Image: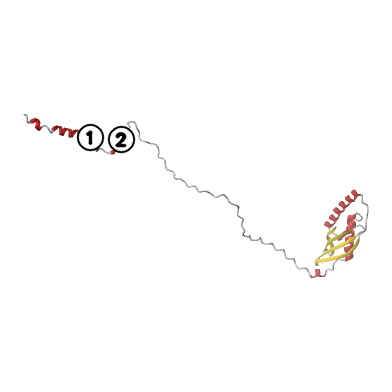
Amino acid sequence: MASLPARLAPVPTVLATSARAPSMVAKSAPAESLTAEAQPADSQPDTSPAVRAVPRRHLHAVPPPGPARISTVPRPAAPVPLAPVPAPLPAAALDIPPPDLSVVRLLAVYSYEILDGSRAVGQLGGWITREVAEHLTARRAARTERRTLTRDTRRSVPVPGPVHLSRPSPLVTEVTIILTTPARSTAVAMRLEYLRQRWRATTLTVL
């Protein structure tokens, strides 16, 4: 019986080994169980939506606007419309004689007297057009009003000087004549056109 305790001596060692087994098992447990144990009991998993990362946009400096550029390239010129070619004159028009110089002098003197108030416009008859008659009537009214305001009652008889003729075409004659009075000299310019088988003043100006 005294030798029995000697045989049972190793038992505590075995028990101690078995008592260490739980700690070894705990050490060999996976990391997930350790993480679960480290979290508090009342914590819940995060259910908030994931935030998408927005890439940054690179901003570049914009230079200030410079002066407007003016194009130096010449633009093509617009086509110039051509003047219509006049129809050829009949052969009879080339034989029209120039206006009589005596008639031209009378036209100049009568025009001056109409503006002076000593002759009526109707006395020129068919030697002037309707537009010329209206022009002389308007000029006469303006000059009569001026003479009334200045109380100028003088009347003068002009003396015609040399006549200068120019024929741009066989049917047109341009005339310039100088009228001389004791007070002053006056120039008369007119344009005569061959209308209805006679010369007529289509433009008449007493300067």
Residue 106 percent location from the top left of the image:
90, 62
* Quarter of the image where the C terminus is located: bottom right
Instruction: From this view, report whether residue 198 is shown above or below residue 10.
Output: below
Instruction: Using the rendered view, name the quadrant where residue 180 is placed.
Output: bottom right
- Is 143 situated left or right of 14 in this image? right
Q: Which residue position is annotated with label 2?
A: 36
Query: Residue 7 got which mark?
Result: none
Query: What's the residue at 31%, 34% (across, down)?
Result: 38
Q: Residues within 10 Å of mark 2 (few under 14, many from 20)?
A: few
Q: Residues within 10 Å of mark 1 (few under 14, many from 20)?
A: few
* Quarter of the image where the N terminus is located: top left
Residue 196 percent location from the top left of the image:
83, 63
Question: 206 or 128, which lies in front?
Answer: 206
Residue 164 percent location from the top left of the image:
85, 65
Callout 1: helix, strand or loop?
helix
Question: 25 or 142, which lies in front?
Answer: 25
Q: Which residue position is annotated with label 1?
A: 23
The tag earlier along the polypeptide, 1 or 2, is 1
Q: Nearer the viewer, mark 1 or mark 2?
A: 1
The three-letter code of the residue at mark 2 reads: Ala
Instruction: Using the rendered view, name the quadrant where residue 110 is placed.
Output: bottom right
Query: What's the residue at 28%, 38% (across, down)?
Result: 31
Residue 14 percent location from the top left of the image:
15, 34
- Is 69 situated left or right of 9 in this image? right
